[in-house]
Structure formats: C-alpha cells, structure tokens
Image (cartoon, rainbow, N blue to C red):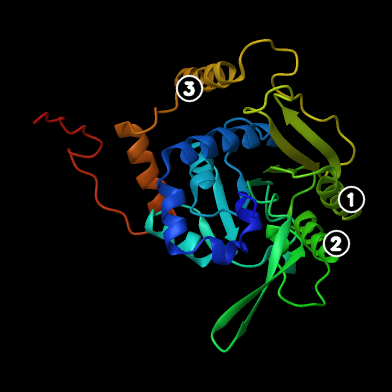
Amino acid sequence: MSGRPEHQAPPEIFYGEDEARKYSRNTRMMEIQLTMSERAVELLCLPENQPCHLLDLGCGSGLSGETLTEQGHIWTGVDISSAMLGVAKEREVEGDLLLGDLGQGLPFRAGAFDGAISISALQWLEFFKVRYFNNYCLIFHLIDCRLCNADQRSHNPAKRLYIFFSSLYSCLSRGSRAIFQFYPENSSQVELITSQAMKAGFTGGLVVDYPNSTKAKKFFLCLMTGGQQPLPAALGVDSREDAPNHVAFSQKRDRVKQLRSGKAPKKSRDWILEKKERRRRQGKETRDDSKFTGRKRPSHVW
C-alpha cells in the first residue's frame, strides 16, 4: 500500500487519538504547517492591520489556526476528526471548533467570512467507505477526497464537491478568497476539484510555488468570489536560489516587518498579554495577569 496517509484509511479513522497527538507534537510538521499557513494568508490578500473573520477548513489540531491568531484574525475551524479537534481543545486554541463533514455543506450564514484557508486537506482524494458488521470494520476503497468523505453508495464525489464549494461560496463575502494548499496525486484529481469549484461560481486557478524544486514545490488552489482576477505570482519561478534558503529569508523578512510595524514579537510579554486580552473578549476563562506573566524562566544545566 502507498505511504500516503490518505491511501490507508479515512481521516476520522486514520487520525485517531494516538495519530492526532503524534501529528501535533511533530516539530517538523509544525514548521511546515506554519510556513504553508503564512503563505496561504498572504495569498488571501487581506487588508493590512485589520482583523478579519476567517474559516479554516480541515483545521485539525489548530496548527494553521494559530497562525491566524498571531496575525490578529478571528477564525472558525471545521474538521471531520473528533480526535484532532480534541487535541485542538487541549491546546486551547482561540478559534471556534466545529465537527462536521464538509461534503455535506457548510452550515454558516451568507457572507459570514472574509476568507478561507485549507492546509493539507484536498489531497485526501482517494477515500475509503467504512461499514461495521458484527463489531468488525469493513473498509471499501473508493474515489473521493477528505472534505467529501462518503459513507453511502448514493454519495457521488463530484456532487459532494459541488455541494461543498457551493456552500463555501455562499458563506464568503463578495470579493474574498479561499486558498487550498494540497498535494495532488495526478492531473485528474486537480481537474475534478477545480471543475466543481468553477461550477459553484468561483474563479481563479492553481498557483505553484517553486515549480522546479522537488522538495519545496507547493500547490495552492486560489479561488476568488469577486469575478475574474489575476492570479497571485508564484514564488521561486525566476529565482535561482535554493528553495530552502529562499523560504527562510522570506520568514526572516516577515519577522523584521512585524517588528517594524509595532507588533509585539511572539512569546514576548506584550504578545502574551494581548493574547490573554483576546481570550477575555471572547468570554474564555483566562488567568489573571501578574508580574510573572511572560517572564523567562532561567535555564538550569545539571
């Protein structure tokens, strides 16, 4: 069987409690999620210095949502794995969490969100139908995707994709964007997804960063609701630098830009106080501030 996780089991089974915790504690995975989430937010082209209400599709344990929080946005996450959402709740992420199958449509009012991102969800284009018989789990291999995970013979992949994209188009404000980072297995998967998105009313297309690099190559499906617009420029198209160095430089430049804009550096006292204040405004239980808030603990070498 292929090493790709989407070939092994549907997401709500593959990402059980053990796998969900392992995924959320993997430092390499966290770094990759951070980089891709920052790029997805960049492709949204949101107004500067203005908090937006964003939708995180396939939010998992909230790794991508933390990027949205750090940039001052309010977000709502949807995922089909209850174990992943459980880890997100334990990590006390600041977004609202919803358990649901995206293939059945999104239950939000029209124009509720200023944009949407999805990190590493669309590549679940091959799925498994799950049936239980006498306490045994029977798995049947079908064709679909993570967001359109089906459990009935009548579920049609293209139809469920259309239902999802139609409901997404409805709950986005006009002029906003939806950015999907994913790992397509072949061109037919890309064609199936994009055709249903365009049928639902979206415009846009595929943005491929570092197309000539094997490791740094990333696919972003950029969908727009405000009519035909030019696609954002891809990274690394004309650059002859090594992709990892280019990514690291971009991250460093973003950190410097953040400092120059007056925003508190991550993990600093001001950053922690601001985060606690946001939690209080959201009505969440938050510890009182003290002189020890944000103070670095001395490191001991034994």
Element on which disc 2 rests? helix
287 and 23: which is toward the camera:
23
> Looking at the picture, which amino acid does disc 3 mark?
Arg
Element on which disc 1 rests? helix
Q: Which residue is mark 3?
A: 255
- Confirm or deny contact between disc 1 and disc 2 (CB under 8 A): yes
> Looking at the picture, which amino acid does disc 2 mark?
Ala
Which corner quadrant holds the C terminus? top left
Quarter residue 233 falls in: top right
Any part of residue 106 in sight: no
**Which sits earlier in the primary sequence, circle 1 or circle 2?**
2
Which residue corresponds to the image point at 39% horizontal and 31% vertical from the top-left?
A: 266
Q: Which residue is mark 2?
A: 158
Report how far apart the C-alphas of labels 1 and 3 lie in the structure. Answer: 37 Å
Q: Residues within 10 Å of mark 3 (few under 14, many from 20)?
A: some
Residue 123 in the image: above or below residue 253: below
Residue 230: image x %, image y %? 85, 29
Between disc 3 and disc 2, the foreground one is: 2
State left or right for residue 201 relative to residue 48.
right
